[in-house]
Amino acid sequence: MRFKLLAMMVIVVSVIAGIAATPHGKDAAPVAWDAQGSARYLDQREVWWQGWARSGRDHGTICISCHTQVPYALGRPALRGPLQESGLSAPEQKMLGDVRRRVTMWNEVAPFYSGDEPTRALQARGTEAVLNTLILTSYDARREHLTEIARNAFDSAWALQLTTGKDAGGWVWLNFHNAPWEGEESAYQGASYMALAAGLAPEGYAKEPANKVRLDLLRGYLQRNYDVQPIANKLVVLWAAAKLPGVLTAEQKRALAKDVFALQHEDGGWSLASFGSWKRHDSTDEETKSDGYATGLALLAMESAGVAGNDTRTARGLAWLSKNQDAADGSWHAYSLNKQRDQASDVGKFMSDAATAYATLALEAGAHP
């Protein structure tokens, strides 16, 4: 009797603290993780980004970073349930207010980047338009109501969609030769983000007749260019395909799951370096050990698309996430594809920012298959 009572107390405490999740499989053991630690890390990093001098833009706004702000906007709300929160955290409120201001002042604010290259401003505009849309729509999806400002963000993004040429259906995207978000392969990932936004949009937005031509162009672009993408991009479009029908075929989804599981490490995790062919600018070797970014994204995408399978491979991946959350700061570590960085530095944490958000989403998806 005392043993049963103790076991019940442990379960209750775990749920209240937000550290329990259950992987796929009816006989799978619980996966323990620190949801409070994840929230603390993500909030602290968002506050740092908002205050960093280099992230500031005109009209008192902040650059929307693919590595910190976008994953934060997608991952932080997933912690609302485990932590029994009733509303947005303070950093979320500031982040959303800033995005809304940029959308409202779209014709007044300057692009995030201009520079000497003639296309840089256009790249910045296309990138920001898509990311604004994804952030606002992801929050509206949780409230099941598409706000007017999110519709305005969609309109700004659609206005910049390419309609002719080999890239018809996509967007001109920032290219600083930095993988995975601002490199040669990143335009495809950006288009996948737009597909995810359209799929998440509540109240039947993707089925509205006015959007048919735009979405058909987007689906065509994603299909035409799918085969040549690195697996990292294929996982993002798989995630989007779970929300927007017609992006990938069932066979493409199954084949991708097979390829991804073939890259799973013995410890249960994945390495981002194995998801593409990249070379660091400083000629150092890519980090090949399992990391939180690759493991979180792989599990999240496959769980969302329903191709992860109720088997030990998925459970092993979730167990890797459980074992490799940093007990000190609540993060999951990941490593730059572009140069060797000091993991303790603020810039060195960029990949871990995204990794922590994706790991959080994967663990939450694993808890509610």
Image: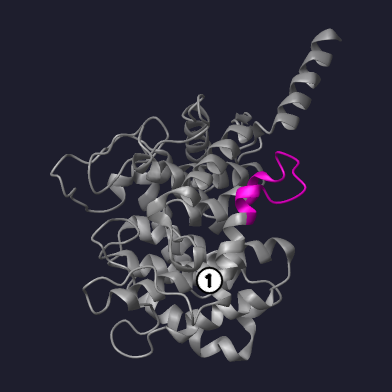
Q: From this viewpoint, is residue 310 visible?
A: no
Q: Which residues are magenta?
A: 77-93
Residue 349 percent coordinates (x, y): 39, 40
Indicate the position of residue 193 as horizontal and vertical percent values. Answer: 47, 66
Three-letter amino acid code of the residue under disc 1: Arg
Q: Nearer the viewer, residue 299 or 51?
A: 51
Q: Percent position (x, y) of residue 103?
A: 55, 74
Answer above or below: position of 235 versus 215.
Answer: above
Residue reaching furthest to the front? 59
From the viewer's side, name the closer residue of 241 and 339.
Answer: 339
In this rendering, the answer to whether 201 lies above or below 268 is: below
Residue at 61%, 39% (x, y): give it: 25
82 magenta-colored: yes
Residue 116 lies, in percent from the top left, at 21, 73
Q: Which residue is mark 1?
A: 102
Q: Is residue 32 visible?
A: yes
Colouring convention used in this rendered image of the protein: one colour
Horizontally, is 189 left or right of 13 in the view?
Answer: left
Between 258 and 363, the one nearer to me in the picture: 363
Is residue 9 toward the left or the right of residue 186 in the image? Answer: right
Which residue is at a point 47% across and 32% down the rendered structure image? 320
- Residue at the (70%, 46%) spot, across then down: 80
**1 sits to left or right of 184:** right
Q: Residue furthest right?
A: 1
Query: Does the segment drawn in magenta span residue 346?
Result: no
Callout 1: helix, strand or loop?
A: helix
Question: For mark 1, does the 10 Å Cα neighbourhood hold few (<14), some (14 to 19), or many (20 or more) residues?
Answer: many
- Residue farthest top in this picture: 2
Q: Quadrant of the N terminus?
A: top right
- Residue nearer the viewer, 309 or 169: 169
- Total numbered circles: 1
